[in-house]
Structure formats: C-alpha cells, structure tokens
Amino acid sequence: MEVLARSRSASAVEASAMPVIIRLEDKYDGIRCQLHKLGERVALYSRDLKEITLTFPELADAARRIRSDVILDGEILAMRGEEILPFADLQRRLGRREPDLFMREQFPIKFVAFDLLWQNGQTRLNEPLRSRWESLQHCPRCQTNFGWPT
C-alpha cells in the first residue's frame, strides 16, 4: 500500500509543496529468502546466506517456471490456501537433511516476493524501489507456491 505523507522541512509552505510517498507492506512471520533463478538453475538463500534449496524443493521446482532470469527478495511462509500458518509450523521444516514428502503436505509453503533485485542480466538495485516494485508486478511468474504482494 502506498500513502501520501508530508516531508519535514523548514516551513509549512515547503512541506505542503513536497509530498512524499511511503510504501507500507505486511510484516510476515516467515523466513527471509533470496531466490536466484538463472535458466534451469535455482538456489534459495537464507538471511545469513545459507543455501536452503534442498529444504524447500517445491519452491525451486516452481521457480524454474518463471520465464525471466531473476533474483527476488522475499519471505517463505507456511501457508494453506490464503491462510498463513504459525511460524512454528514452518520451523518444523527447517534443518532437515533430507526432504520429507509428508512435511510438504502437512506444512505447505509459499514464497512471497517483495523486491526484484536483478533481472535478465541487469541489476535493478540502482533503480528506485517503486520502479523495482512495479517491475515485480509485471515479472513473468508462476502460480504455484508463489505469492505476490498487492
């Protein structure tokens, strides 16, 4: 959601002439994740740069259907349909050495992207957040296991 705010400045006249757009997003209780997709290769990285691709193979499989090469910043959430499950449910999937098919069914997950950092060989980090977010909304996407903020 974007809201219009007034910037702090020396005078009320200047403040009314200089509106500022502020972006507000939901705070999710999940795992921060960067998704790197280049061709058929997909890697998921946690906040501390640990590769977690094998923990969430269904995300990697779904990401291969994205038509663009991308690096997305987002959050992995335990979700059933549109219901966000407690973080404790997501934690049960962490730290496993081998994927567990029953965990996938019991605690389904989604990757919710909130920033487009790189696309088709070009960094997007020098662009304003608003521009990156608008590009994210138009990024060719897959439907399964992905959520996109509105």
Image (cartoon, rainbow, N blue to C red):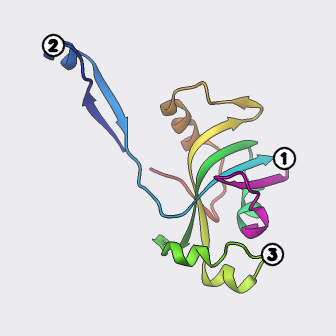
Please tell me which residue is depicted at 70% across the width and 36% down the height of the picture.
Answer: 119
Q: Is residue 10 above or below residue 47?
A: above
Please tell me which residue is depicted at 72% across the width and 42% down the height of the picture.
Answer: 70
Q: Which mark is residue 97?
A: 3
Are circles 1 and 2 on residues that touch, CB within 8 Å?
no
The question of residue 50 being in magenta is answered with: yes
The question of residue 48 being in magenta is answered with: yes
Q: In the image shown, does 138 or 25 lie closer to the viewer?
A: 25
Which residue, given by chain and number where applicable, does mark 1 sit on? Answer: 39
Q: Nearer the viewer, mark 3 or mark 2?
A: 3
Q: CA distance from mark 1 to mark 3?
A: 26 Å
Q: Would you say residue 80 is visible in this rendering?
A: no
Q: Which residues are magenta?
A: 39-57
- What element does badge 3 sit on? loop
Total marks placed: 3
The numbered mark, 1 or 2, whose residue comes first in the sequence reads 2
Q: CA distance from mark 3 to mark 2?
A: 61 Å
Tag 1: Cα neighbours inside 10 Å, few (<14), some, or many (≥20)? some
- What element does badge 2 sit on? helix
Q: CA distance from mark 1 to mark 2?
A: 52 Å
What amino acid type should be assigned to the residue bearing mark 2? Val
- Residue 40 in the image: state x and y as whole percent: 85, 52
What amino acid type should be assigned to the residue bearing mark 3? Arg
Which residue, given by chain and number where applicable, does mark 2 sit on? Answer: 13
Indicate left or right for 112 with 50 as reference: left
Please tell me which residue is depicted at 56% across the width and 34% down the height of the picture.
Answer: 132
The numbered mark, 3 or 2, whose residue comes first in the sequence reads 2
